[in-house]
Structure formats: C-alpha cells, structure tokens
Image: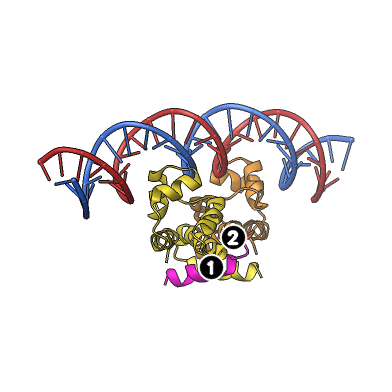
Chain colours: A orange, B yellow, C red, D blue
DNA sequence: TTATGACTTGTCAAATTTTGGCTAATTTAC
DNA sequence: GTAAATTAGCCAAAATTTGACAAGTCATAA
C-alpha cells in the first residue's frame, strides 16, 4: 500500500473531497490530486497534518510515506536488497 | 563501512593519491576529498569508474553507496525500520 | 625555518531538481 | 446535459546539488 492510495482510502471513508483536504493543507486541488496518485510527494509536515485531519495514525502514515521515498531511491538497483540490509543494521 | 571510507581504504591499498583518482573522475581534488569523507555524494557513474580504477567489485561499491543514501533518508525517522521492511517486501 | 606535497575547509555561482499554482481537459454523479 | 470533482500539462519561483576556486591545515624534508 502506497501513501497516496492510503490517503485516498481514508479520505473517501470520511467522505471528504480533495479540495477540502487541499484547503486544509493550503495547497491547490491539482496538487493534492498528484499527491494521492503518487506523482508528487507530500512534505513531512503535511503527512502529520493529514494524520490529524483523517484521524489516522501518524506513524502508520509516516511509515508508508517514508517507504515510498526509499523505494523510489532503490527500485532500479540490483543491489537494493543488500543495501537495505546494511541500512537496517546501521540504524540499530 | 561507508562508501567514502571504503574508497579511501582501496585507494591507499593501491597507493594512489586523491589527485590521481580525482583526475580520472574529472573532478578536482577537494571534491574527491569530500566524497571520501562523505561530505559529498559520488554519482552512480563515478562509483562504476572507481570500481574499475580500484579494481574493486562494482556491486559491492554500489551497495554501500546506495546504503549511504538510504541511511541519509531514514536516519532521523522513528519509523525507519518499519519503512525498510515495507520496501524490502515491495521489491521482491 | 622554510618549502613542498597531500589533503581539507569555506565560499560562490551555475546547473539541476523540486515545488506550487494556473489553465484546461477529462471523468463522474446527478 | 451540466455541474462538480478530479486529472493533465505547463511554467516560473524556490530550493537543492554540483563543481570549481582560493585559502587553509598538517606532515615531512631540506
């Protein structure tokens, strides 16, 4: 599950429109649409705000938001998995 | 082991000077110095060139080079580990 | 001590990437 | 059909990255 998908899911379950959330984030609707479709990346601060607005778990959203970015970085690399393993041990 | 450290190690074992490798990479010595110290990031292409010049395994270097970048991205996040797990399953 | 070579530090401008918003197009709901 | 919602494409402003230069430190040798 990617960040945008999850946001969309939460938004629809609360029956909110893109333009409503967009307004709360102080961005325009097209931009919000792009975030939902993963064409643009939300800022960290926006993730936190969305968690509040959608009454969702901030850590859950941060996790998938961060995962998207990591994925973006490694996806074309053959050595992706090995690199992840290294990082995993480095952060512990 | 970080990328720069490893490069330095390899460079010294071959008794090469920073300026020699810098010249091969077509960058100046200060830039090379920064790459070795992790202050600047090498380009992918430079990693491959370094592997050749240092007769090292390109995948090994790419792996730690990539790991540095991932680390940089996640290091300040509490949810780093969880995000890595997600990416790990996503790339498989 | 002075000189030299290797490396590092700091700063700057050029280049690239990211960001945000506008307009217009398309899709969806009625 | 039309009106609202969403998406697509484009452009300029802002931010980040890149590379180079000048000047600095540090060690060693003359």
Residues marked 2 and 1 touching at CB (< 8 Å): yes
Tell me the chain of label 1.
A
The residue carrying pointer 1 sits among few (fewer than 14), some (14 to 19) or many (20 or more) residues within 10 Å by Cα, namely many
Rendering coords of residue A27 (x, y %): 57, 41
Q: Is residue A52 visible?
A: no
- Distance (Cα) linking label 2 and label 1: 9 Å
The residue carrying pointer 2 sits among few (fewer than 14), some (14 to 19) or many (20 or more) residues within 10 Å by Cα, namely many
In the picture, the quarter occupied by the N terminus of chain B is bottom left
Rendering coords of residue A22 (x, y %): 60, 45
Rendering coords of residue B11 (x, y %): 42, 59
Q: Which residue is mark 2?
A: A74
In the picture, the quarter occupied by the C terminus of chain B is bottom right
Q: Is residue B73 magenta?
A: no
Q: Is tag 2's residue or tag 1's residue first in the polypeptide sequence?
A: 2
Rendering coords of residue D5 (x, y %): 71, 46
Q: Is residue A89 magenta?
A: yes
Q: Is residue B27 visible?
A: yes
Which type of secondary structure does the marked residue at label 2 adopt?
A: helix
> Residue at the location (51% across, 64% down)?
B56
Which disc, if any, is residue B59?
A: none
Q: Which residues are magenta?
A: A77-92
Q: Which residue is mark 1?
A: A84
Residue nearer the viewer, A68 or B3: B3
Considering the whole magenta stretch, tell me its main secondary structure. helix
Residue nearer the viewer, C21 or B36: B36
Residue nearer the viewer, B82 or A4: B82
Which type of secondary structure does the marked residue at label 1 adopt?
A: helix
């Amino acid at each position: 599950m990617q960040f945008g998908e999850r946001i969309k899911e939460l938004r629809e379950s609360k029956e909110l429109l893109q333009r409503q959330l967009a307004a709360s984030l102080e961005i325009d609707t097209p931009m919000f649409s792009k975030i939902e479709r993963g064409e643009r990346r939300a800022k960290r601060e926006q993730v936190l705000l969305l968690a509040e607005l959608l009454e969702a778990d901030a850590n859950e959203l941060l996790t998938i938001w961060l995962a998207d970015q990591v994925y973006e970085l490694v996806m074309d690399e053959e050595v992706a998995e090995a690199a992840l393993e290294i990082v995993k041990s480095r952060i512990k």
